[in-house]
Image: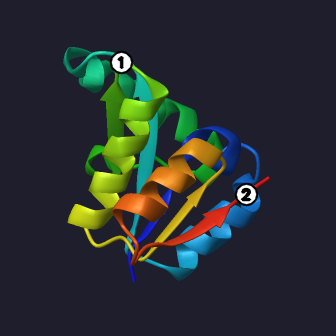
Amino acid sequence: MKIAFDIDGTITKHPQRMAALMAQFPGWVVLTGGIATPDQIDGHKLARQSQLIPFIGEAIDLTLINICLGPSVAEVARLKGEYCRDHQIDILIDDSVEYCRAVQAISPTTTILQVW
């Protein structure tokens, strides 16, 4: 089973719960988004890795962090949907209404768990 976890408002808001889920499902990835240009992805990955260490208690492999960067929320939402579709993500756990709606529309086989 492939599960994608958002960072801000998801892992950061519920770190113990998300870490427990990650421990139960070895096929997880981090799928986060940001308003930026593609040439900033390496810097974003390093920053996200540093951000995750306190929440999951250990260094995370950079290949598990997938960042959808775009010039707008709508573009980032589309990219998250395409990622879930193209990588056959079974479950997306995210706090963003826009991102959840886009994934639902673009990747209808992905189950959406929106956190509040």
Tell me the number on the disc at residue 84: none
Tell me the crowding category of disc 1: few under 14, some 14 to 19, or many 20 or more residues within 10 angstroms, Cα based. few
91 sits to left or right of 13: left
Closer-to-camera residue (33/56): 33
Q: Do we see residue 101 in this rendering? A: yes
Residue 87: x %, y % from top left = 24, 66
Q: Do we see residue 96 in this rendering? A: no
Tell me the number on the disc at residue 71: 1
Instruction: Tell me: residue 33, above or below residue 92.
Output: above
Q: What residue is shown at x 66% (from left), y 49% (from top)?
A: 95
Residue 85: x %, y % from top left = 28, 65
Quarter of the figure with the N terminus: bottom left
Task: Indicate the amino acid at tag 2.
Answer: Val
Disc 2: which residue: 115
Q: Earlier in the sequence, mark 1 or mark 2?
A: 1
13 sits to left or right of 46: right
Residue 74: x %, y % from top left = 44, 33
Give the color scheme: rainbow, by chain, secondary structure or one colour: rainbow
Task: Indicate the amino acid at tag 1.
Answer: Pro
